[in-house]
Amino acid sequence: SRRAPSGSPIWSARSCRCLKQSRNCVAKPETVYLRRGAGPFLFWLAAIFGGGTTVRAWHPWGGVLFVLFFAGMFRIWQRQMRLDRDDWRWLRRAHRYAAHDESGLPESGRFNGGQKALFWIQGISGMVLLLTGLVLWWPETTPRPLREISILLHPIAAVISILGYKWPMRFSA
């Protein structure tokens, strides 16, 4: 087992059997979800939460909560998540990390380059979701071309956000 400089063991996500099992249970259904859409698989959730009309009414408010919580996290972590030269080197060599070969990877501080990139991907997709969501929330107040662009970009940003969380799970075990 590897040890940190202080002598305490370093926990490795790749060595955790539980995470390997959870990856198989979560990542594979997520792929099906992304291919076919939420309707066929999550319709029962709408029934639990009051039906499709109620879920559609609450969806924008969930987006507002997402933005508020992410804004707080962004404010706290923004300085720590700046990508430096070592982080860009780490990202160019991320395929080694994915193949469980950490040789040649630059030393990471608290967060490696992949975690920092994920933070910025979530931040950008969150802003796109917020802006397009506002347009879709009040469609009668925006010009038609802006509505059409928002209709296109909103689900694309959602898929990028979901993949941003799911893709690293493929490499964690």
Image (cartoon, rainbow, N blue to C red):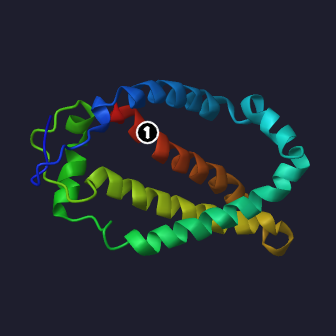
* Residue ID at (81%, 33%): 44
Which of the pair 54/132 is nearer the observer?
54
Which of the pair 14/18 is nearer the observer?
18
Residue 26, x across and y down, in percent: 53, 31
Residue 54, x across and y down, in percent: 88, 52
Q: Residues within 10 Å of mark 1 (few under 14, many from 20)?
A: few
- From this view, report whether residue 95 is shown above or below residue 129: above
Q: Quadrant of residue 9?
A: top left
Left of 140 or right of it: where is 119? left
Q: Secondary structure at mark 1?
A: helix
* Quadrant, the N terminus: top left
* Quadrant, the C terminus: top left
Q: How many marks?
A: 1
* Residue ID at (52%, 48%): 160
* Residue ID at (14%, 46%): 105
Q: Quadrant of residue 146?
A: bottom right
Q: Amino acid at mark 1?
A: Trp
- From this view, report whether residue 73 is shown above or below residue 45: below
In the rendered image, which residue does mark 1 sit on? 167
Left of 67 or right of it: where is 47? right
Residue 28, x across and y down, in percent: 53, 26
- From this view, report whether residue 69 is shown above or below residue 113: below
Q: Please say whether residue 124 is visible from this viewpoint.
A: yes
Residue 97, x across and y down, in percent: 23, 38
Q: Please say whether residue 147 is visible from this viewpoint.
A: no
Left of 120 or right of it: where is 143? right
* Residue ID at (60%, 70%): 68
